[in-house]
Amino acid sequence: MATDGDLERHGLHDSATVLQVLREGTLTVEGRLSGASNATLFCVAELDGVQIECVYKPVMGERPLWDFPDGTLGHREVAAYEVAATFARVCDDDAVLIPETIWREEGPFGDGSCQRWIEVSETQLVDIVHTQEEQPGWLSVLEASDDFGRPVQLIHQDDARLRQMALLDMVTNNSDRKGGHILVDQQGDLFGVDHGLCFNVEDKLRTVLWGWAGQPLTPGEITALELLRDELVGGELGVRLALHLEPFELDISVERIEHLLQRGHFVEPTSRWPSIPWPAF
């Protein structure tokens, strides 16, 4: 495990420092991510000489959606991070699969979420390949044809971190797990981003990570889900999420965990809702 000294030599900081700088630091807007559907601003947060690059999403820049309450997407980003951080703790895992994310009430453009920026590497864990042959070390999600009628496959690596991310998406009811929302940083760590479309009260799971659909939960996964449920019902996680989600959204999240435990296997796609986000990348 990396020490604080190792982190600082790589220009990184421990999670507690990152959260403090994001929460209390001066936020300076450097630019805008033009491809995002909502206002997504690249910023630098600075506190006592420590600078953290981050993504700031003000509420005033959110586009209204027919199936999510207005002005709530940033809160859902923060809630997803809180679930991921708790899930990592109950799994006794140092790797939190969502970058540090906090709620800022006094940003340059008002209230909004603020998340540590990830400097990505070229590592790709989700891909589309022009073949229907089995790819060793990869799991097939779907087969289709491209614009020229050639066979293609949507695939993702058979990676334990991706499996944990897929499980988290089921708990948070993530409706937007695109391939481009799965990042590997320069140190080889895996992160998921863009969690504004989570925690809907209706089942809206849309993801490219269907490779484990129907597979049994491992004993470790069952234990982690039970501990996560307990944290939601009577622990600190429930208290923190109550700042960002409605009570009925919390109740539904607990029910989703209960259903996973009762079934004992990963969720499978249904015809009630599109199972793949569009576009997939």
Image (cartoon, helix red, strand yellow):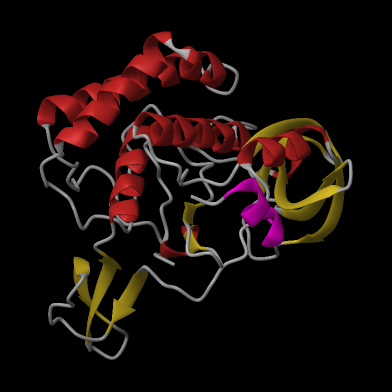
Q: Main secondary structure of the magenta part?
A: helix
Look at the image and tell me whether residue 178 can be seen: yes
Q: For the point 70% across and 54% down, which residue is it?
A: 8
- Furthest residue in direction top, as rendered: 234
* Quadrant in which the C terminus is drawn: bottom left
Q: How many marks?
A: 0
> Visible in this render: residue 59?
no
Q: Is residue 58 left or right of residue 189?
A: right
Specify the quadrant of the image occupied by residue 222: top left
Span highlighted in magenta in the image: 3-12
Instruction: Identify which residue, 224 or 272, lies in the foreground.
Output: 224
Query: Can residue 9 be found in the magenta stretch?
Result: yes
Q: At x 32% / y 86%, what residue is drawn?
A: 147
Judged left or right of residue 238, residue 213 is: left
Where residue 234 appears, as percent x and y from the top left, is 41, 8
Position above or below: 125 against 78: below
What is the quadrant of residue 62 in the picture? Answer: top right
